Image (cartoon, helix red, strand yellow):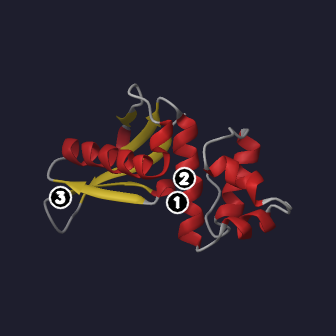
Amino acid sequence: MELEGKVWKDPDSSWWLVEISFLDVMTQGKTRKEALEMIKDAVMELLKDSYEDFLGKQFQVTVNLYENGVIGMGASDDKLLFALGLKRQRLRSGSTIRDVSRRLKSKSPNAYARYERAQARPSIEKYAELLHAANPSRRPLLVS
């Protein structure tokens, strides 16, 4: 599974911009290739900050370039990307883990926190529910 992003040349400068909105991360490079490398590096640093104990020597982040500047970001363990996405969206919304737990109508904040800590892998349906609870103002990425 991949997270969708985009890469484009800034019309007001010579820089290439790249963004993975779900992870709330954006960077730039002098070339498109450099911008794509920079986004991989940025996401790896975010992953190291939160999930260093889960990252083995074999862990890799990949970026694929598709048509019209669309990119796809994947990882050798996509559970970590999704956990990072939940955390980044929760922080972006200004919510606490308890706030998210309340939105999920859960009595235990630890139930949600397990997903954000990459200790549990949700189904697609559950993931959409978790994402909405983490950041209610974000439009759904997953539709059934």
- Front-lying residue, 39 or 71: 39
Identify the image quadrant of residue 97. Answer: bottom right
Question: Which residue of the protein is positioned furthest toward the front in this rendering?
Answer: 53
What label does residue 15 carry, if any? 3
Residues at circles 2 and 1 in contact by the CB criterion of under 8 Å:
yes
In the figure, 138 relative to 35: above or below? below
Q: Specify the amino acid type for callout 2.
A: Gly
Residues at circles 3 and 2 in contact by the CB criterion of under 8 Å:
no
Please name the residue that numbered disc 1 is placed on.
Answer: 88
Residue 116 is situated, as x and y percent measured from the top left of the image, at 62, 51
Please name the residue that numbered disc 2 is placed on.
Answer: 85
3 or 2: tag closer to the N-terminus? 3
Q: Badge 1: few (under 14), some or many (20 or more) residues near its Cα, within 10 Å?
A: many
Q: In this view of the protein, can residue 143 be seen by the observer?
A: no
**Location of the N terminus (image quadrant):** top right
**Location of the C terminus (image quadrant):** top right
Count of marks placed on residues: 3
Q: Specify the amino acid type for callout 3.
A: Trp
Q: Residue at x 45, y 35 (%)?
A: 55
Identify the image quadrant of residue 119. Answer: top right
- Front-lying residue, 57 or 87: 57
What label does residue 104 carry, if any? none
Between marks 3 and 2 in the image, the one whose residue lies nearer the viewer: 2
